[in-house]
Image: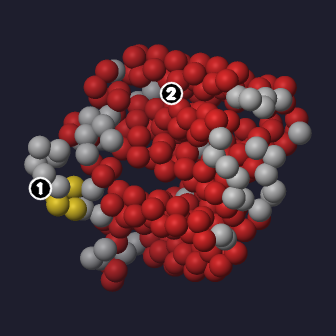
Amino acid sequence: MQVLKRILNFYLNSSIHVALAASALTWVTLIELDLKLDKYLLYFVFFSTITGYNFVKYFGVAKFHHRNLAAWLKVIQVFSFIAFLAMCFVTFYLELNTLILIGILGVVTFFYAIPVMLPKNYLFDDHKNLRQIGGLKVYVIALVWAFTSVFLPVVNEAVSINTDVMILGLQRFCYVLVLMLPFEIRDLNYDSLKLATIPQKIGIKKTKIIGVLLLLLFVLLDYFKDVLTEETLLSTIIIAIITLVLLIFSNKNQSKYYSAFWVESLPIMWLVTVLLFS
C-alpha cells in the first residue's frame, strides 16, 4: 500500500498528471476543429508541461540547495531534465510559427517563476514574479493553457484563426479558470493575503457562484459557433456538469487528492467523453 501511495505521489508531484490533462485538452481541440492528430504536438505539450510546471514549482526550493535536496526532489529534477530533453527533441517536428508562439509562452512561464524588478505600485515587495502579483495568478495560468491547448494546434496546422477558434479559446480560458477555483479554495489556509486570490477577496460562496456563471458561459458559447455538432455540445454539457459537482463540493479542508488528482482529471475525462462520442 505504501509503495502505491509513493507511486501516486510521484505521479502527482512530478506533474505527470497535469501534463496528461494539458495534452488531453489539446487533443479535444484537434477533434473539435477536425484537425490532424499530430502526435508530436501532443508529445510537446506533455513534456513541456512537465518541464514548465516543475520549473515553476521547484525553482525556489532547488536553486541554491542542490547538495541538500531531499531524495524525492532529486529524482524529480532528473525526471524533469529528461522531459526537457524530450521536449527539445520534439520541437524539431513542429512548424516555425508554432515555435514562435512556444517562445512567447516560454517567456511568460519564465517570468511567472523568476523574481523580477517591477514598480512598487504594482507589487507589495520589490522582487516578485508574476504568480505573486495580487490577483494575477489564475488569469496567467488560464491564458497560457488556452493558448497552449487551442491556438498552438491551430497555428501548427496553419489553420486560419476564425470566429470558432476565438470562441473555443474563450471557452478554454473560462473552463481553466473554473478548474483553478478548487485549488484557490484549498489554498486559503496557506496563501499569503498579498496574493489576493479570488476566494480571499470575495469568499468561498461567491467564488463558487462565479464558477457556476463561468461554466454557464462555457456551455452557452457553443451556440455561437458556426460549426457545432451534437457530439461536441453533449460532451461540453457533460463535462460542465461533472466540473460543477466538484466545484460545489470543494472546500478549504478538502482531501490532499481532491484537487491534485480528481479536479486535475477533468480534462482527461473530457477527452474520454469526446472520444466515445466521436
Left/right of residue 269 with respect to residue 115 in the rendered view: right
The part of the image, by quadrant, that contains residue 137 is top left
The x, y position of residue 100, in whole percent, is: 52, 67
Q: Nearer the viewer, residue 170 or 68?
A: 170
The part of the image, by quadrant, that contains residue 219 is top right
Number of residue marks: 2
Left/right of residue 56 with respect to residue 268 in the rendered view: left
Image point (30%, 52%), residue name: 130
Query: Can the viewer see residue 18 in this picture?
Result: no
Question: Compared to 214, does 51 lie above or below?
Answer: below
Q: Which residue is mark 1?
A: 126
Question: Compared to 31, does 99 lie above or below?
Answer: below
Which residue appears farthest toward the bottom when viewing the image? 67
The answer for how far apart the CA atoms under marks 1 and 2 are is 34 Å
Image point (76%, 44%), residue name: 33
Left/right of residue 121 with respect to residue 13 in the rendered view: left
Q: Which residue is mark 2?
A: 250
What's the residue type where badge 2 is placed? Ser
The x, y position of residue 235, in whole percent, is: 77, 30
* SS state under label 1: loop
Question: Compared to 69, does 41 lie above or below?
Answer: above
